[in-house]
Image (cartoon, rainbow, N blue to C red):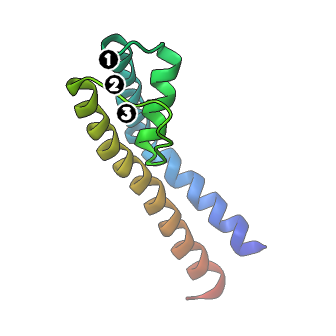
Amino acid sequence: METTLHFLQIFFQALFYTAPILLFHIMLILLIATIIARKEPMPINFAIYMSFITALTVGYGDFTPKKPLSRLLAILLGIIGVIFTGIIVAAAVYATQQALHATLGI
């Protein structure tokens, strides 16, 4: 239990330090969603949903862009999402290493 608590403490601290980068990525996703909503016949809430689903590489396929610019932006969303997810995974790996080192000496 001590390792888990230590992990969570370090993980959230790492997320706090990377918050400006993560917020920048979220703002990019929202900006691209706004552009897609203007280019496609799609309400803004659907565009935001589609953008986050695409950025997080889930891609349900229920909403797909039809126009070339929107498709290009969807590709950009995928790249942004991979970076966004990578930062969170890197924070989790760092927290795991630090927690195990602190509690188990590994």
Q: Mark 2 sits on what residue? A: 32
**CA gap, disc 3 to disc 1?**
17 Å
- Depth check, mark 3 against mark 1: the one in front is 1
Q: Which quadrant of the figure contains the C terminus? A: bottom right
Q: Residue furthest right?
A: 1
Q: Mark 1 sits on what residue? A: 35
Residue nearest the viewer, comparing 64 with 4: 64
Mark 3 residue element:
helix
Give the residue at x 41% y 41%: 55
Quick one: label 3 or label 2, which is nearer the N terminus? 3
Residue nearest the viewer, comparing 59 with 16: 59
Mark 2 residue element:
helix
**Position in image of residue 61 (x %, y %):** 46, 39
Q: Mark 3 sits on what residue? A: 24
Q: Is residue 32 left or right of residue 58?
A: left
Q: Is residue 6 left or right of residue 15?
A: right
Please identify the quarter of the rendering in which residue 39 is found. top left
Q: Amino acid at mark 2?
A: Ile
